[in-house]
Amino acid sequence: MTEVRKDGNRHPFSKGLLATSLAITGLPLEERYEIVREIDRELEGVETIHTREIQKRVERKLQERGLHREEKFYRVTRQLSRLEQPLFILLGGPAGIGKSTLAVELAHRLDINRIIETDTVREIMRNMVSAELVPSLYRSSFNTDKTVKADLVDDPLIYGFNQQVDVVSAGVKPVIDRGVKEGVNSIVDGVHVVPGYLGMTDRDDCHVFQYVLEVPDEAEHARRFRSRANTSNRDAGRYLNNLEEIRTLQQYIVEEGKKHGATIIANESVDQTIEEIMDNITTELEQPTPSHT
């Protein structure tokens, strides 16, 4: 049996583990196992091999198949654990846009173990701050205008939403700082991930990729709320009754994203959005090697 060497340790070669590592490429399971079986046959009679050599064999197999983008995904993401600075992916957008679904899929594809949800931070802060002190914290993002006296501002919804984002951001920033200090690759997602509030563009101690997601078609946006209600306890009616406000927040967050240099993505297909984000991240992080110059 072939033993694989890594960081001074040894373990038996595992076809299952190698196939799992290929999930990063987005290839179908059968195609992944076809590559794994070819490598397994090549290792017959080989007593020990370094994990880097296995990775090179995988890269070669992908290139031979003309799967150049998939090869880049595999090669670059294998380097993520060795980055000198941690990676932070920020996913913003209004309710019902698919942020959580994308966060989970990206975490799986990039082998990221930490997902920071701003709604969770808000729930924690509710137990620490009273409604009398910060009323916007106790409202959904799309009805924060109920906490604002309309005669004081031009747009109560945006004003109240900004108040909520400002408070929640104050709770998210220490979590991000902790992640940077620990060197942990992380994904931050939520309606409160509004470009300009977390101060990430000014940081030089981590790799930051900020995305604002939108659903341009209103009917599709409404359909997603109905679909989500079928797999959770969230009442679709509550969101559909406030769809106009949710769409207004979408427009505002997109505009803020454009102002602060975030990448705006029309999330019409989860698979397509994942590929676009993966391509963007791996292209930016790709480090030239003797065989890739």
Image (tube, rainbow, N blue to C red):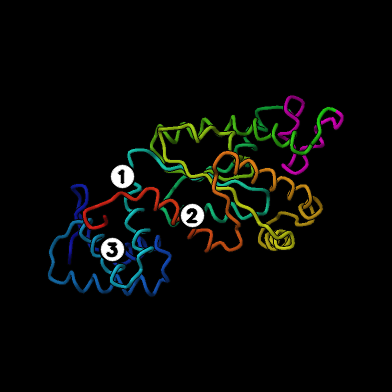
Dot 2 falls on a residue whose secondary structure is helix
Q: Is residue 115 magenta?
A: no
Q: What residue is pinned by disc 3?
A: 59
The image quadrant where one finds the C terminus is: bottom left
Where residue 249 is drawn, which disc sits there? none
Furthest-top residue in this view: 133
Q: Residue at x 70, y 59 (%)?
A: 221
| Residue type of the residue flagged with mark 1 | Arg
Q: Is residue 142 magenta?
A: yes
Q: Number of numbered discs present?
A: 3
Image height of 74 relative to 126, above or below: below
The image quadrant where one finds the N terminus is: bottom left
Mark nearest the camera among 2 and 1 is 2
Q: Residue at x 64, y 31 (%)?
A: 166
Marks 2 and 3, how far apart at CA: 21 Å
Magenta highlight range: 131-151
Image height of 178 relative to 213, above or below: above
Q: What is the crowding at mark 1: few (fewer than 14 residues within 10 Å), some, or many (at least 20)?
A: few
Dot 1 falls on a residue whose secondary structure is helix
Q: What residue is pinned by disc 1?
A: 82
Image height of 200 relative to 188, above or below: above
Where residue 277 is drawn, which disc sits there? 2
| Residue type of the residue flagged with mark 3 | Glu
Marks 1 and 3, how far apart at CA: 18 Å
